[in-house]
């Protein structure tokens, strides 16, 4: 799963915020987590560590998106708080629908060839 997509979901949910400074230049690798040029977020070790820690604490769960999900959005009732959408009891779940490349199966057709058969009763 691309870390860029995870970062976008975390920012959208308010769990991370954009960096204060953004020093982006065209054609160079850019880290959205740090807001600097030099590496991209896919190779950012600090973001990977942060994500792994939150997954280890069961604050975030990353799953592949299913075709048919039984989950639906539920509004908070008057008695419930409408605070953060996750807690340690109910982690933030990020669904990712990976586009899969269609791979054509290889078919190998071998033409049968004649083999020389000699009598198996022959004495050498």
Image (cartoon, rainbow, N blue to C red):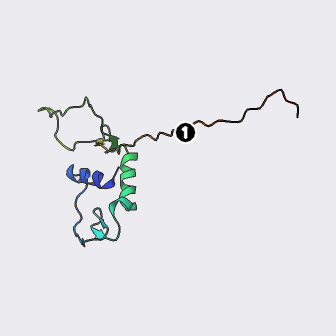
Q: Where is residue 86? Give x, y as percent.
A: 26, 42
Question: Looking at the picture, how far across and down is residue 66, in whole percent?
Answer: 30, 35
Q: Residue 48 occupies which quadrant of the picture?
A: bottom left
- In the rendered image, which quarter contains the C terminus? top right
Q: Residue furthest right?
A: 124
Q: Residues within 10 Å of mark 1 (few under 14, many from 20)?
A: few
Q: Residue at x 17, y 38 (%)?
A: 81
- Give above or below for 3 relative to 25: above
- The image quadrant that residue 31 belongs to is bottom left
The structure residue drawn at horizontal position 64% and vertical position 35%, both measured from the top left corner, is: 114
Residue that appears at 22% across and 61% down: 18
Q: Reply above or below: 29 against 65.
A: below
Residue 75, located in which quarter of the rendered image? top left
**Residue situated furthest left in the rendering:** 78
- Circle count: 1
Element on which disc 1 rests: loop
Q: Viewer-proximal residue, 69 or 45?
A: 69
Give how far across and how far down residue 52 sits, in percent. 39, 51
Residue farthest top in this picture: 121
* Residue placed under numbered mark 1 in the picture: 110
Relative to 40, residue 81 above or below: above
* 100 vs 42, nearest the viewer: 100
**Percent x, y of residue 33:** 29, 62
């Amino acid at each position: 799963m691309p870390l860029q997509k995870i970062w976008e979901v975390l920012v959208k949910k308010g769990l991370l915020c954009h960096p204060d400074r953004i020093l982006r230049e065209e054609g160079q690798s850019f880290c959205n987590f740090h807001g600097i040029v030099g590496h991209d977020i896919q190779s950012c070790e600090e973001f990977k560590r942060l994500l792994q820690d939150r997954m280890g604490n069961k604050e975030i769960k990353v799953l592949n998106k299913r075709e048919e999900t039984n989950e639906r959005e539920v509004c908070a009732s008057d008695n419930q708080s409408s605070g953060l959408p996750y807690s340690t009891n109910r982690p933030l779940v990020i669904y990712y629908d990976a586009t899969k490349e269609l791979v054509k199966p290889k078919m190998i057709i071998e033409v049968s060839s004649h083999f020389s058969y000699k009598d198996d009763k022959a004495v050498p």
